[in-house]
Image (tube, rainbow, N blue to C red):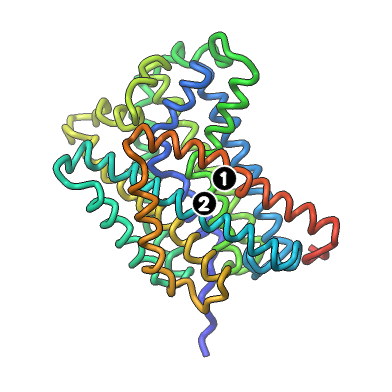
Amino acid sequence: MREPRQITASQTMMAIFNSMVGISILRLPRIASEHVNSGAILVTVIGLGLMMFGIGIMTLLGYRFPKTSLMQFSKQIIGKPLSFLFGLFILCFFIVLIGFITREFSFMLSSFLYPDTPIIVLVGTMLFLVAIATRNDITTIAYMHFFYFPLLCLPLLALIVLALPEVDVRHVKPFLGNGTTFSDFVQGGVTVAALPFVPIGIFLLTVLTPHTQNAKHAIRGSLLGGLIAGVVILLTVFVTIGVFGYMETKSPLWPLYVLTRMIQLPLELLERLDILFLGVWVLSTFTTILSGYLIVIYTGSQLFNLKSHRVLSYLALPFVLGAAMYPQNIFHLFELIEQIGKIGLILTMGYPLFLLLIALIRRKGNMSK
């Protein structure tokens, strides 16, 4: 009988990268600038530092409890009742979060490509495609991320390289911002860490780690994926603010997309480079929603002791669709994403840290490693 395929460190890295480089980074320069003006680079570093802290906690848990999911080892640490309660909170959080991401993506498509198409059609189409994709096993989904990685990474690096000559370093000075306080940086860092790509990247590890070849591969892949994604995200913030300045960056909803409309290739090979990058954003959003939706159905299957996550692939659709259609407009959506994201930090960082501390105190898990 053939051995089941397992996820490698490189596939883990690429899955984490693809999940984090989504539609949220299009407005990240604006969010960072609104909090600390020219200190946006530093506040992004703070937010990404919190992200790496969360990834580190989750990898330590995965290393201590290899080949087991979050729901399985949380039962060992805090017992079934508390584990079920927190699992239910996590499930509801990601249902709402994925719905909101899909709604933002659909609004962007409606604004630039399909102004006459109803939002619910765009939302429903994306969610249906994601539901079909999650009918595959976990390893196959990891292979999908492996295939999409160069299609996302290379265009983003090309954008950064093409934008660098237009950067005015004076736009990112002073690095500590103008008239900003320590509190502004803390609030800004928390806001950046609360953006959807952070909890999705962190909790995707709870799905991938039990299926990796060994715990060391999971650690190596997750840390490398988070680091590469963090560097790329930081560079996109740098070039966006370096080109526009923090004042102009605050105006558009998605300043990074506006940047793609200004960039030109040498010899004018393509007149509308933004159309190419819009395709990249569509793909990046698909991979982010794919990972988030996988977290939803995988968590649900573990929570309710189902044989496979595939059972919930279509059953979860109405709940995510309902969450997506709740916001009244794009500004209401952004407000809700920020609120739910900050609350979610308790689940995505506080809860894993709590589990790790209790596991250390109670000497649970594989202590020999």
Residue underneath mark 2: 93
Q: State the separation of the CA atoms marked 1 and 2.
A: 7 Å
Q: Secondary structure at mark 2?
A: helix
Closer-to-camera residue (125/303): 303
Residue 17 at x, y = what percent? 48, 49
Left or right: where 328 falls relative to 63? left
Circle 1/circle 2 CB separation < 8 Å: yes
Q: Which mark is residue 88?
A: none
- The structure residue drawn at horizontal position 56% and vertical position 43%, both measured from the top left corner, is 227
- The structure residue drawn at horizontal position 50% and vertical position 43%, both measured from the top left corner, is 229
Q: Residue furthest top?
A: 179
Q: Answer yes or no: is residue 149 visible.
A: no
Left or right: where 163 falls relative to 271? right
Residue type at tag 2: Phe
- Dot 2 alpha-carbon crowd within 10 angstroms: few under 14, some 14 to 19, many 20 or more: many
Residue underneath mark 1: 344
Closer-to-camera residue (42/37): 37
